[in-house]
Amino acid sequence: MPKNIHTICILMLVFFSVSSAYSYTPSQFDKISLKQNCQRELNSSFRDMAGTPSCDKLKKIELEENQPSYKVKLEQ
């Protein structure tokens, strides 16, 4: 009996962790933090070696936010 309870608890934990990972939406604080980090990375002398991961992540978030929730059919 206890082994079944542990199995059920582990399965529930995995389910909630996976579902919360896919339902994450960045908050306004996350965006502000990314913007500040992006500015630092752009002004950094190590930009050529390290790149700008914060800017890339910010661009990705902005692109996802600007996507329509339904498909738009363009007429030609």
Image (tube, grey):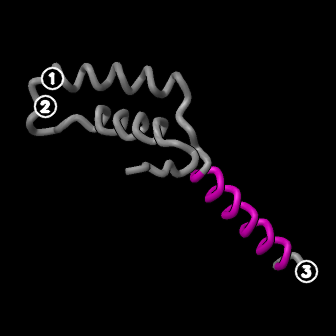
Q: The disc labelled 1 sits on which kind of residue?
A: Ser
Q: Where is residue 60 in the image (x, y as percent from the top left)?
A: 37, 41
Q: Which residue is drawn at 55% across and 29% down?
A: 27
In the rendered structure, the answer to whether residue 45 lies left or right of residue 27 reads left
Callout 1 environment at 10 Å: few (<14), some (14 to 19), or many (20+)? few
Q: Give the range drawn in magenta.
A: 4-22
Q: What element carries label 1?
A: loop
Residue 4 vertical placement versus 31 (above, below): below
Residue carrying label 3: 1
Residue carrying label 2: 47
Mark 1 touching mark 3, by CB under 8 A?
no
Point out the image quarter for the N terminus: bottom right
**For the residues marked 1 and 3, what is the alpha-carbon distance in whole angstroms?**
59 Å
Residue carrying label 1: 44
Q: What element carries label 3?
A: loop
In the rendered structure, the answer to whether residue 12 lies left or right of residue 57 reads right
Q: Where is residue 41 in the image (x, y as percent from the top left)?
A: 22, 26
In the rendered structure, the answer to whether residue 34 lies left or right of residue 55 reads right
